[in-house]
Amino acid sequence: MIGLGLTIPSRRYVSLYNNLIFPVSGRTSGTPTNGTITFTSTADLTVEKTGSVVIVSTTRANDALFDGVQLRVHTVVISCPNNESGTLIIRRSDRIRAFGNHNGASTPSVNFYAGTDATMPIVSWNLNNLPVLTQKIRQTVELATALPTTGNRTLPTGLTFLRLEGSNINWTYSEALPTGLTFLFLSGANFNWTYTGALPTGLTYLLLAGANINWTYTGTLPTGLTTLYLSGANINWTGNILGNTGTPKPNMTSVSLFNYRNPSDTMDYTDLLSILNSLINNVGTLPTTVTIREQIAGNVTAIAAASPNIAGTQAEQSKYYINLIKSTKGVTTFTLNTTNI
């Protein structure tokens, strides 16, 4: 074989394959504090460091049993002196299934990175480097300086849970999301998602909040939604059918349409009556408070003053259906724009 000029990879070369590397730096001043990174994999993984990064501790414990595999959650506490830097290296990162804990069939409950934002090490996170078999990502606490996050590529195809919050998350993307996604929570000024089309059909949780989320769609929302929250100056959902017709969680915990249409697409009576009808036909209860903004102001005034009448004017019909929703679906406050009907 040697005579043919072939090179056989050494064991060290193989061991370096699929490593995940995070640049880490300390602060410029102040008293440094520790940061805690949590991830979950299908086996115990080795975590190493370079430079001035200090691994204070690494603990491993059982997470959920999922798809017949005992998942292992890793908790890595790190520090870094002021004005110094290095890297954190996770070996065999292809085995990672979650950033944060995984929690099996349930919602994850632990964030990927935690600590005191102003004093813990700065960990740079590039979403382009996510392992291809990642299933869940959870970062619910906004870290304005400690977790600068970038990315401009498609997310892993098997992703089912995505929750990212923070103005320092700079994710730019213009395609569809993974088809198996069931939980989507994006909240931050620098999510630059530009997409025209349907959301994953299996979504049960949908929250989009941010001025640079450019999602445009005219069709029906996923029928299994239990949570709905849209608020963004460049979100333009002009559909008129929502509501939960699926299982296993028919009750809706949020119906909050704050900023979801372009100014030129203010909702008229026809659209409103269609949404009201879909709420009436919702399987299960609705949240105690329902908010639907971006209505024609004059219509809201007319609805508030109208007597409920299923066969009357459009304002009277709207009032009738809102009253019906309140009397049958557990809603106590139904707000159009800022008017309680």
Image (cartoon, helix red, strand yellow):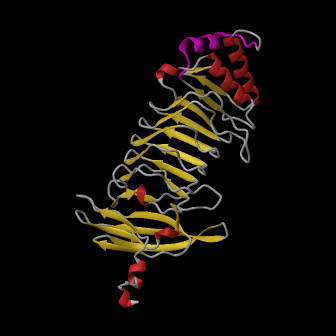
Is residue 333 positioned above or below 105 on the image? above
**204 in magenta:** no
Quarter of the figure with residue 104: bottom right
Q: Is residue 91 visible?
A: yes
Quarter of the figure with residue 223: top right
Left or right relative to 313: residue 182: left
Q: Is residue 74 visible?
A: no
| Residue under the point 26% across and 59% down | 27
Is residue 277 positioned above or below 79 on the image? above
Is residue 139 positioned above or below 232 on the image? below
Left or right relative to 36: residue 69: right
Quarter of the figure with residue 30: bottom left
Q: Position of residue 298 (x, y in %)?
A: 56, 11
Q: Position of residue 36 (x, y in %)?
A: 43, 64
Left or right relative to 89: residue 329: right
**304 in magenta:** yes
Q: Position of residue 335 (x, y in %)?
A: 60, 24
Q: Position of residue 150 (x, y in %)?
A: 37, 52
**266, 141: nearer the viewer:** 266
Q: Which residues are drawn in magenta?
A: 294-309
| Residue under the point 45% across and 76% down | 46
The quadrant of the picture occupied by the N terminus is bottom left
- How many numbered marks, from 0 up? 0
**185, 131: nearer the viewer:** 131
The quadrant of the picture occupied by the C terminus is top right
**135, 210: nearer the viewer:** 135
